[in-house]
Image (tube, rainbow, N blue to C red):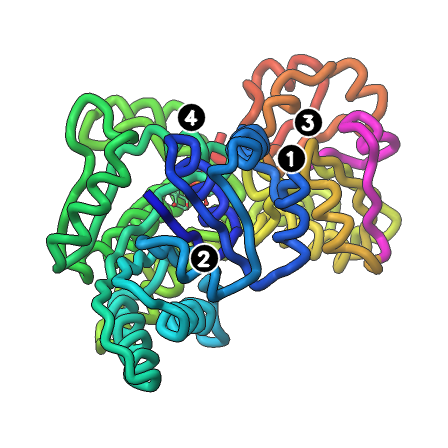
Amino acid sequence: MKVTLIGTGYVGLVTGACLADVGNDVLCFDVDARKIAMLEGGEIPIYEPGLREIVRANAAAGRLTFTTDAKQATRHGRIQMIAVGTPPGEDGSADLSHVLAAARNIAEHMDAPKIVVDKSTVPVGTADKVRAAIAEGLKKRGADIAFSVVSNPEFLKEGAAVEDFMRPDRIVVGADDPVAVTALRELYGPFQRSHDRLQVMDVRSAELTKYAANAMLATRISFMNELALLAERLGADIEHVRIGIGSDPRIGYHFLYPGTGYGGSCFPKDVTALLRTAQEHGLDLKVVGAVEEANERQKGVLVDKVLKKFGSDLAGRKFALWGLAFKPNTDDMREAPSLVIIERLLKAGATVTAFDPVAMEEAEKTYKSESGITFAGTAMQATQGADALLIATEWKAFRSPDFDALKASLKSPVIFDGRNLYEPAVVRSKGFEYYPIGR
Ligand code: UDX
């Protein structure tokens, strides 16, 4: 099938590359000429395991092409997938300007019937706005061409996006047009395994499903983070509690890990946007509001422990930080707890030396002119002469460090672990003062 992807960010590029990989003829459009030039040269603007390989292979096979030409993009695919950003606006509601600009482009250039697919995470009611924008654009041209608008949210985890796309646990399609449903069923056919994973529903339910999924996952995390705080007060171990409750199949083990708060491009933005949507409809979501509040508090927990140990004035102190990305296997630092940790340490007068296996370039861009923060070439180098080590991301490479070398490198053997990477008794027996979360 001929498919156009509008937007070559995480979602658009992964979707385009995976659809090409099963034989579709995919054209990826972006307004950012620099990005398109990079992609044409086989360079991938983001770090995502496996993505570079499938982009290069499918580009070489001629199934994956790139353009900045809106007309060419519109004419190419019967299926037009909108996968542009929906950044939070000033009030936290999703900014739809890129989505609606894409819709207007389609209306301006379409010369045959189109199935327009909203892939971006967009508030309930957006499909109606996209439909209205296209209808208005066509009317302006005096054109009468059939189109339908479908909601098809993605459920891709960064760091595992290609795998998630190739082996989806569900494919949600919100559509009221049976022709569009048939087309999407065909498009996603190669990704079906063992049973039908395509769930067809009305457009608004599909739009809400995406927010409901992310808010539910965020709720589990905030709940566990809150219980971790309580466990500390009570002298209980949250790790035992996690295993204790996770064994109930109604609860399950996934997404029960306490830490330094959830970050990334999805959870914080989507939780806020869901709250705003509800407010716009006169509803105050109590649980979701508390999830957000708890997460804000949690991002400060690790530094609170530092201040408790070293006092509120950290002038002259140096801290090593392992992990900058919001989670492992990505270079994404959006809403990462590390940002809050660094800001608070610097504000209290300390200096920070950070290391991350892949997010260093991203971090250097973020902290270009900031004084007080430096970056080390290796994890161990970051710890040299530091008053303590803080861990913000659970990269595999941090899980089993040479503790003797670490102890020799640090000025004092103190670890604040925001990801519970180590067994407290073991690290303490090696002579470290160890501050995990909820243990
Ligand atoms: C998420 C959803 O998982 C995905 O389905 C959706 O499409 C986009 O948002 P992503 O943002 O890539 O994906 O990251 P995810 O792996 O879900 O982690 C989100 C945050 O929660 C991270 O900051 C992570 O560290 C944190 N987290 C996750 C915890 O603190 N504890 C957990 O148990 C799980």
Image quadrant where residue 20 sits: top left
Q: Give amino acid for label 1.
A: Ile
Apparent side of residue 308 relative to residue 297 in the rendered image (left or right): right
Tag nearer the camera, 1 or 2:
2
Q: Looking at the image, is mark 4 or mark 1 nearer the viewer?
A: 1
The answer to whether residue 405 is magenta is: no
Amino acid of disc 2: Ile
> In terms of depth relative to the viewer, which is nearer, 207 or 316?
207
Q: Which residue is drawn at 26% across and 65% down?
A: 124
- CA gap, disc 1 and disc 2: 37 Å
Q: Quadrant of the N terminus?
A: top left
Labels 4 and 3: the sequence-earlier one: 4
Quarter-of-image position of residue 19? top left
Q: Is residue 113 left or right of residue 237?
A: left
How far apart marks 4 and 1 lie (CA) works out to 17 Å
Q: What stretch is highlighted in magenta?
A: 371-390
Reply above or below: 23 against 127.
Answer: above
Whole-number angstrom distance, CA of label 2 to CA of label 4: 43 Å
SS category of the residue bearing label 4: helix
| Residue 433, numbered label | 3
Q: Which of marks 4 and 1 is nearer the N terminus?
A: 4
The residue that label 1 is drawn on is 391
Disc on the earlier residue, 3 or 2? 2
Which residue matches tag 2?
Answer: 6
Residue 169 placed where, x, y %?
27, 33
Callout count: 4
Give the residue displayed 70% in from the left and 35% down from the top. Answer: 356
